[in-house]
Amino acid sequence: MAFFSTVQPLVNRWRDMTQRWLDRRAPAARRVTLDHGRLFVLPTRAGLAFLLVILLLWLLGTNYENNLVFALAFLLLSLFVLLPVHTFANLSGVRLQLLETQPAFAGDYAEAQLDIGRGDRRARERLRVFWPRDLGGDGEQGAELDLIDRDSAGLTVSLPVLRRGRVRAPRLRVESGFPLGLFCCWSLVDLDIEFLVYPQPKPAGPLPIGAVAGDGESTQRIRGGDDFEALKPYRPGDSLRHVAWKQYAGGRDLYSKSYDSGADTRLWLDWDLLAGRDVETRLGNLCDWALQAERAQYAYGLRLPGTTIEPAQGPAHQKRVLSALALFPVQGG
């Protein structure tokens, strides 16, 4: 444990220095073209093993003074020397552009839509784009493509997001091991990607229909209440208790009294309904209610401290409500 506590600050310092160097050398942009200033080439494990085989062949040829073994060793060495040039050329000139990002829920994967172009007429093969594990990605949700008979292609890359709010994505890794996989040409690209992450929905029980009193602007009249509404012509079958006997005694026609009551039928997702719970739990509960209300096609509004969204429904309204939940200030931070 003492060893790791000593090494970790050095690792963090090295990462910070590398990040600052990358920010100067390859600043953030929504459209990037890979060139010699952004690309790096290093041998892979297979490449190092290949180099070891060449060394063993050279030792074998020297020991047995065998010219054929020498010829094979130098042939493989010449191939090893030429491969970095071809690997670099396969990635040089490739263009990357951010098209759009999709909102996601905390604990899920956020997706970014990219456009990859080859930049010239040369074929580009075995291109791979992903977020490295050490930069916050999982190293698996990447995408691979070839640009042989097409100039560009769209692809989707996914990043795991753990917290709500605006989450800035780390640098994407673009790499290719073409043609033999003995060398890898790669680059860390910052496409200025930012995701809007909604709170993770947390079950909050049934919708709080009628739990919050409204301001009376959107009410529905419910027949059979206690408030007098109007007189209506008497129809056979009407209750005799509701007959307007005074008007009838005054020589008017026979009328019945109708009663109703005003009730607020709007659905309010109110912060105060979840008192006693921590901030993130409240936001998760409100998120769950919003999803339930949208599925049930209720008109619903949101009340947060300092924010009120009037009742409505539809994809645009749902996005507005979820965005308000996502951007609610982080408490204590």
Image (tube, grey):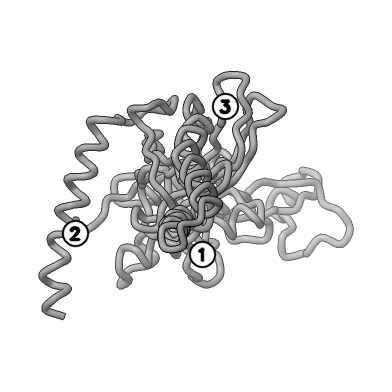
Task: Identify the residue position indicated by label 2 in the image.
Answer: 11
Residue drawn at 43 percent across, 44 percent down: 173
Say whether disc 2 or disc 1 marks the residue closer to the N-terminus.
2
Residue 175 location (% of width, % of height)? 48, 43
Residue drawn at 46 percent across, 54 percent down: 54
Task: Identify the residue position indicated by label 1 in the image.
Answer: 208
Q: Residue furthest bottom?
A: 1
Please give left or right for residue 12 compared with residue 38 in the image. Answer: left
Residue 282 location (% of width, % of height)? 37, 64
Task: Identify the residue position indicated by label 3 in the image.
Answer: 117
Q: In the picture, which quadrant includes the C terminus?
A: bottom left
Q: Residues within 10 Å of mark 1 (few under 14, many from 20)?
A: some
Q: Is residue 6 above or below residue 35?
A: below
Q: Residue furthest right?
A: 236
Say whether disc 2 or disc 3 marks the residue closer to the N-terminus.
2
Q: In the picture, which quadrant includes the N terminus?
A: bottom left
Q: Secondary structure at mark 2?
A: helix
Task: Work out how far the residue at label 2 is from the one at label 3, CA to CA, in angstroms.
Answer: 35 Å
Viewer-nearest residue: 185 or 195: 185
The kind of residue tagged 1 is Pro
Say whether disc 1 or disc 3 marks the residue closer to the N-terminus.
3
Q: Secondary structure at mark 1?
A: loop
Q: Are marks 2 and 3 in contact (CB under 8 Å)?
A: no
Viewer-nearest residue: 329 or 269: 329
Marker disc for residue 114: none
Q: Is residue 100 above or below residue 60?
A: above
Please give left or right for residue 148 compared with residue 254 in the image. Answer: left
Residue drawn at 77 percent across, 44 percent down: 251
Q: Quadrant of residue 331?
A: bottom left
Residue drawn at 52 percent across, 47 percent down: 71
Viewer-nearest residue: 319 or 83: 83
